[in-house]
Image (cartoon, grey):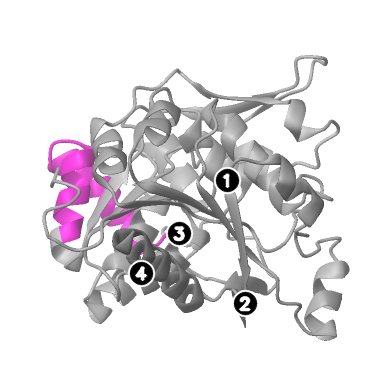
Amino acid sequence: MNEPFARSEPKIAFIGGGTGSFNLLSEFKNHTLQIAAIVNMADDGGSTGILRDELGALPPGDVRQCLVALSDSPNMRDLFNYRFEDGTFAGHSFGNLLLAALEKTAGGFSNAVDVASEILRVNGVVIPGTFNDVRLRMEWPESSVMLHGERTIDADHFRYDPRRANLSLIPKPTVNPMAIKAIQDADIVIIAPGDLYTSLGPLLIIDGMGDALARTDATVIYVCNLVTKDGQTNGFSVADHAAEIERFAGIDFLDIVLYNNKIPSDEVLGRYKAENAFLVEAKPEQFDKVAYNTIGGDFLGEMAERDETSEKLLVARSLIRHDAEAVARKVIKLYEQDRTL
């Protein structure tokens, strides 16, 4: 696999997967070519889940989205994201099928990602968090409740407080050394927005990730989610989200938390309220108790209709997304200010 960084530009490592990473990566590549996207490998839903179960392939979905986000070839981006509508391949994206085939023919998943990166003319590098074939498990020590699989957990309405639950990967994985190197070598590490328990948690709980995040000289920034998720993060504030991020890693490592403080229109709020989803509140009184810096801003983007490239094929509603350009401008400004100190 290619080295994470090789040029004299701002070096940014992203941690996440799915739409949250895709949205930010698509913009940040306009500011630096020195990007390493460290990707969750616990996905088992949609097209990815079928390929895992039927072919024994490692999950290609989140890797594909990050590759496409960093590609500078519009035609190949469209091809990799093309999703078959009918027949045997209905529901599968071309990129997922190609990555599964490359894993079999190119000598493993690492080589498959390298070949796909060449085809897509990727600016940067996409790094699977682990190459082990893992499944996500969530359990509450005080009860007999145990959830198996990312897809099951993602769809569940938790009976108990998720902040008391333990996340684990089965079998216990070995961290990809390239992920650790990317974190160590970065100027900035960004924890991308995404589902706490099925997108970010599966990466941060891998042994070695928390220690690398605590030891790096990079500025570690969490871009907080915009809205709560019904049945999972109801009532979670900005600080609550950040606390879970650090709990997964087993150590306090955040330097900055960026959060949105713009209120959307009543129409948009109404659409979310109908699904019992609400804007994540800042609650400034909680910020006095944390070690990281908090920075609010207008990070609210336009409403985005259903993402046909997503592995979450049953999601039908529109989404509030971050204004990726505003987030990138703020992060680059922080980087430039830090360099002048």
- Return the mark for residue 292: 1
**Quarter occupied by the C terminus:** bottom left
Tell which of 133 and 304 is nearer to you. 304
Tag 1 near tag 3, CB within 8 Å? no
Mark earlier in primary sequence (3, 4): 3
| Element at label 4 | helix
Mark earlier in primary sequence (4, 2): 4
Tag 3 near tag 4, CB within 8 Å? no
Left or right, residue 153 beside residue 186:
right
Q: Which residues are magenta?
A: 91-117
Q: Amino acid at mark 2?
A: Asp
Q: Is residue 76 above or below residue 282?
A: below
Residue 236 visible: yes
| Alpha-carbon span between mark 2 and mark 3 | 19 Å
Left or right, residue 86 beside residue 335:
right
Tag 4 near tag 1, CB within 8 Å? no
- Return the mark for residue 54: none
Mark earlier in primary sequence (2, 1): 1
Q: Residue at x 81, y 63 (%)?
A: 278
Mark earlier in primary sequence (1, 3): 3
| Alpha-carbon span between mark 2 and mark 1 | 20 Å
Q: Is residue 219 above or below residue 73?
A: above
Q: Amino acid at mark 4?
A: Phe
Q: In front: mark 4 or mark 1?
A: 1
Q: Amino acid at mark 3?
A: Ser
- Return the mark for residue 28: 4
Q: Which residue is mark 2?
A: 298
| Alpha-carbon span between mark 4 and mark 2 | 17 Å
- Please tell me how crowded label 1 is: few (under 14), some (14-19), or many (20+) other residues with Cα within 10 Å: some
